[in-house]
Amino acid sequence: MRVVYVDNNATTMVAPEVFEAMKPFLQGQYGNPSSMHAFGGRIHKNIDSARESVADLLGANDPQEIIFTSCGTESDNTAIMSTLRSYPDKKHIITTKVEHPAVLNLCKYLETAGYRITYLSVDNEGMIDLNELKSSIDEDTALISIMYANNETGVIFPIEEIAEIARARKLILHTDGVQAVGKIPFKLTELPVDLLSISGHKLHAPKGVGALYVRKGTRFTPFLIGGHQEGGRRGGTENIASIVGLGVACRLAKKTIKEERTRIKNLRDRLENTLLQHIPRTRLNGNKKNRLPNTSNIGFEFIEGEAILLMLDEKGIAASSGSACTSGSLSPSHVLRAMGIPFTFVQGSIRFSLSRYNTAGDVDYIVKRLPPIIKRLRGISPYRAS
Amino acid sequence: MWNYTEKVIEHFRNPRNVGEIKNPDAVGEVGNIICGDALRLTLRIDKKTDKIIDAKFQTFGCASAIASSSALTEMIKGMTIKKASKITNKDIADYLGGLPNEKMHCSVMGMEALERAIDNYRGVPTKKEMVGEEQIVCKCFSVTDKKIIRAIKENNLKTVEEVTNYTKAGGGCGKCKPEIEKLLQEFWGKEATKISRPKKELAGKKSTNLQRIALIQDTIEREIRPQLKADGGDIELVDIDRNKVYVKFLGTCLGCPSTGVTLKNLVESKLKEFVKEDIVVEEVKE
């Protein structure tokens, strides 16, 4: 059966070029780059080259600003914990209600450990209020951690303006860039964030590798304490194959981002507009304009997301939902709830997230098969438009 | 992804008896859109025989909610009201070859809709109208104490997590979890006293030997040793035999004339207080 994969904010396909580049390091070239002998030591240049590729995609000044980690979550945890340890007298963190659990749950944990957290609210389009951010800052604030783009709605936060506010108050700014890097261009030489997290498997590298950008001059305390790897900033023998993979993935992204950004946006817009126009009682969740080009979150009124997903799955379409039943908890998505999406829509919200491997044919396939599914489930539902 | 049985998937994909009976003899409605699932059940009943001739459902919810509703209508068609009133959520889950634990509330929803429909047929005020007597425990999902206790009783639930899986209570903000814990303790406490005589004696003891020993050790560590140590003495637990606790005094306690008094006053009284009234302390001397 044909598989139409439109769940790329969850994870992406490993690019064939990435896989090819990784192979030698999973087979013959198993040496440890820290070794004195050439068999291991020569591998170091592959890490260096991957570091340059990541820095290049981010538009960073210096490859040394990149630390390889094991995942986006580790990057987020490192950024936050490093800052707190570097400023031990400060006990206040500002973040948002719609962060990924890697930030949100760490903050909830820190609350139990004596930290004060401000969770900025969002409006019904998922945007934060910069005045609320400004008024939340006080003498005790150690860090602002705000995601670059939201994983569920694709909504992009005004990081440039946030960075200005942080800079004016001499505060460290961390941004979770996991969903944004590889989808939209970055130029960190002109965007003054101090720390930025990325995850390999969201941009066609494998799972199990991530990176943290640490701007030169930012105080840093390691999270994983161990050997001298990563300039003493992250202990643990390097995951060579995956780091090489991430490097290649970043090079591919850099090369294709300009065209792909427009092409994917056009596909997404056609998918979105067709569904919104042809299926009654649907709504777009999130700000239409300030959004990642690949993400569309659509609410279908009076039906439940898990049922929609399973019927899509039967047709080979892989998407995701913010409904309670699919989130593994009994409450629907914290992001959609924070946005105040009407209850009649929130349980039936579906996220479509595209990648450069999606085609016009995929969009045709979905727009043909989804409307009958919605109609069928609405036929079962006791709720109707009054 | 949920581990649904083939039967759940089959009923989800091909639900039986979807729709609404016009001018039904009974209607049962449960849940609401905020909770994430809702079910409306309509029945056609032969008033001479009290038999359910036809049943139809409309469900808002996930795959297991739709499958549970479909299964319920299949089960009750042809049944008398009396027989149908005995159907439990477990029967619905069993009919489907089981449901994932986190999804058991879908079968509870089926059972409740059926009950309401039967009440409606019999002209009994529905549970919804009686909510005044009940206390809402979980505000997020509007779950009452009565519903929680019933789920505890019928499904032998022992933990808050299980209660959440079956009733949703505690699954939202989680603030009511201590109250659910209290309901569990109250229920199982009551149940324990209801058990027949020989078991009652056992329950009267309230703790196993192992728990009693641990409690004695803990009391000595926490309540007695620090006091003796402050005076340069110490105590060692030698043995425990039923209600007799054998201890040895060390340090300055050794040969102290007031040992006898210390023994009775401090150690015994503390153990009586924290462990059990009938404890007798005996000193072991070298």
Image (spheres, rainbow, N blue to C red):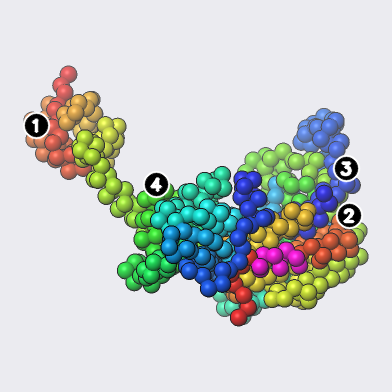
Residue at horizontal 20%, vertical 26%?
A: B241
Query: What is the C-alpha distance between the residues marked 1 and 3?
Result: 82 Å
Q: Are marks 1 and 2 in contact (CB under 8 Å)?
A: no
Residue at horizontal 86%, vertical 70%?
A: A266
Q: Which of these two is toward me, A385 or B118? A: B118
Q: Secondary structure at mark 1?
A: helix
Task: Identify the residue under disc 2.
Answer: A252
Query: What is the C-alpha distance between the residues marked 2 and 4?
Result: 57 Å
Is B208 above or below relative to A377? above
- Determine if marks 2 and 4 fall on one subunit: no
- Residue A299: image quadrant is bottom right
Q: Which of these two is toward me, B9 or A183? A: B9
Task: Identify the residue under disc 1.
Answer: B260
Q: Position of residue A199 (x, y in %)?
A: 74, 53
Which mark's residue is nearer the viewer, 4 or 3? 4
Residue A311 bears which disc, if any?
none
Query: What is the C-alpha distance between the residues marked 1 and 4?
Result: 51 Å
Task: Identify the residue under disc 3.
Answer: A21
- Determine if marks 2 and 3 fall on one subunit: yes
Q: Which of these two is toward me, A282 or A265? A: A282
